Amino acid sequence: MPKMKTRKCAAKRVRRTGTGKFLHNRAGGRHLLTGKSAKRRRRLGKAGGVRSTEMKRVRAALPYGG
């Protein structure tokens, strides 16, 4: 059986933790930051977890873990 292909668009946006969870970068943290509160800017700098409803799609896109 041939090797499965990784979806490169997902591999560049999502990373896997040691426990098998997936993390992604949060949207909205690139520009127009002056209008956002300091609390919100701090939160945007941290990675967010992939939701359980999206896990099936992410696992299919990253067959070797990402």
Image (tube, rainbow, N blue to C red):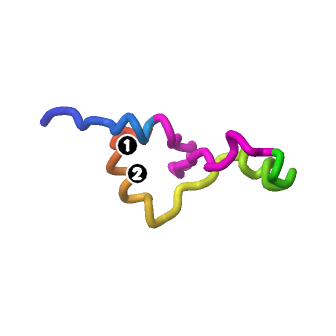
Instruction: Name which residue type carries label 2.
Output: Val
- Residues under numbered marks 1 and 2 in contact, where contact means CB atoms less than 8 Å apart: yes
Given the current orientation, which residue lies at the most extreme right position? Answer: 38
Residue 31 image position (x, y, % from top left):
71, 41
**Left or right, residue 32 beside residue 11:** right
> For this rendering, which residue is in front, 51 or 9?
9
> For this rendering, which residue is in front, 14 or 39?
39
Q: Which residue is mark 2?
A: 58
Circle 1: element type: loop
Residue 47 image position (x, y, % from top left):
65, 47
> For this rendering, which residue is in front, 48 or 19?
48
The numbered disc on residue 33 is: none
Q: Which residue is mark 1?
A: 62
Q: Is residue 48 magenta?
A: no
Q: Residue at x 33, y 36 (%)?
A: 6
Q: Is residue 16 magenta?
A: yes
Given the current orientation, which residue lies at the most extreme left position? Answer: 1
Instruction: Name which residue type carries label 1.
Output: Leu
Q: Residue at x 79, y 55 (%)?
A: 40
Residue 27 image position (x, y, % from top left):
61, 49
- Range covered by the magenta-colored residues: 12-33
Q: CA distance from mark 1 to mark 2?
A: 6 Å
Name the quadrant of the N terminus: top left
SS majority, magenta: loop
Image quarter for residue 65? Answer: top left
Crowd tier of the residue under label 1, counting other residues whose Cα lies within 10 Å: few below 14, some 14–19, many 20 or above: many
Circle 2: element type: helix
